[in-house]
Amino acid sequence: MSIPSIPDIDVYIPPSELPNTIVPFPLYITVHLGAPDEEAMNVTVPYLDYIKNVASSELYPTWPEEALRANIHAITSIAMNRIFTEWYRGRGYDFDITNTTQYDQAYVHERGIFDSISQIANEVFDEYITREGRIEPLFATFCDGRISQCNGMYQWGSVDLANQGYSALEILKYYYGDDIVIVENTAMGGVTETYPGEPLELGDSGISVFRMQYSLSRISDNFPLIPRVEITGYFDESTENAVRVFQNVFNLPVTGVVDSDTWYRIRYIYIAVTSLSQLVSEGLSYEELQRLYASIILEGGDRPIVPYIQYFLNVVSQRYNSLNPIEVSGFFGPETTAAVREFQILMGLNPTGVVDQETLNYLYWNAYSILTATPVEEIRLPLLPDPGVVLAEGMGSEYPRILILQIMLNTLSAIHPEIIPVEIDGIYGPDTAAAVIFLQSLYGLPATGVVDEETWNIISEAYQSYLVELPDEGT
């Protein structure tokens, strides 16, 4: 029997689940109280306090509220751009930003904070400006517009526009263009440095490898001597060769290993060639990263498909003694990578530890053959999330969740005799639709026979509640 292709790995990947695409605001930010190369003290302060301090140093509290909001958005975006690009840390400095307006924005350590500014900052400190379809926070240049001029926002001009009735977003679009958007409610992140903590070398895989390959590939456009690499998330021999050439070009020890110095030099050159730390930049496209990342699942990620991979690995481990069961945690960590590598070896695939389409097809088919041959009363499914693909009558066995759905339906038929047991074949036929319609009616949902997120969650919760009462045995 042929190995089925699985088209619904992840139809949509939110930016937060792509490598380094939404910038988490830091809990703290380290400010250098002087020019970058000037001998001066570094102070590490809460990020929110930093935003309030800069806003109180740059703005007048009597300005119209919409002008204050627009300017505070610009302040947060500059800070987030410095963090995202690691502008200073990538150059060997031990701080995130300076307090000099020649390079960054004003910060007066331990100054007082204006109440009106503090209130607005509390509301918008975790937001930043970006351009539509882009990932990087905009380096939202601003100046007073009277004594000094710039290519960005004029602060006093923003006051005039606010007095004319412009909203904060309209003010920002007036100065930065109609294609800007405000990213809201970003998550808090404790770590601002992107270096993974250990050198990357031949045989490694994961999101850090993906990010490094992406940067190297773009750098090669400006430095053709550096060969382009395929962006797979796996550190193969061609990647090692490209790293060696990069190190030679930029006067680093030629090891082929991406240590901290090489990592940050790659980051530095990538930021330079794409101008990500400037108001007008090439931009980092969400659509491009989505295209590259959609068909691979890497260590370091927590996409909805990950617990399915982990569960299928556990099922297949019954067939192969060398494959150890792993925790179904939903996070793709080193244990999952090791299990994936062992499975790839067993299947005669390249042992990358990366779950690509071919690996996923082999994994599902092996799990499918085991699950369809196992009595339903011996199967114990973990709680598996809905990855966002609606299931409906007519769908075939290439959709793994149909198989999982049928196992849950047959198990629930033990407590709901009205559910006629379905054939567990992974094909969404009329019998599966009828069982779904019964449960939808039972739980007060529209009886459509279509499994959307709400229906999936209701069935999953009912199944898990039933399992609680059963002995802890089975697949």
Image (spheres, grey):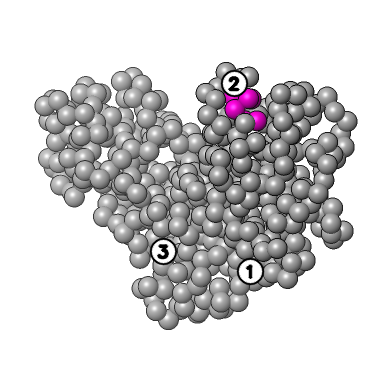
Instruction: Check residue 341 for magenta coloring.
Output: no
Residue 306: percent from left, percent from top = 64, 47
In terms of depth relative to the viewer, which is nearer, 151 or 448? 448
How far apart are the alpha carbons under marks 1 and 3? 20 Å
Circles 3 and 2: CB atoms closer than 8 Å = no
* Residue 437 forms part of the magenta stretch: yes
Q: Residue at x 75, y 24 (%)?
A: 417
Q: Which residue is mark 2?
A: 441
The spot of residue 242 in percent (x, y) is 52, 76
User: Mainly helix, strand or loop, the magenta region?
Assistant: helix
The residue wearing badge 1 is: 201
Direction from residue 285 to residue 425 in the image, left or right: right
For disc 2, the neighbor class at 10 Å (few under 14, some 14 to 19, many from 20) is few
Q: Which residue is mark 3?
A: 270
Q: Earlier in the sequence, mark 1 or mark 3?
A: 1
Q: Is residue 188 above or below residue 6?
A: above
The three-letter code of the residue at mark 1 reads Glu
Measuring 36% from the left and 21% from the top, which residue is drawn there?
A: 119
- Looking at the image, is mark 2 or mark 1 nearer the viewer? 2
| Residue stretch in magenta | 435-441
The amino acid pointed to by label 3 is Tyr
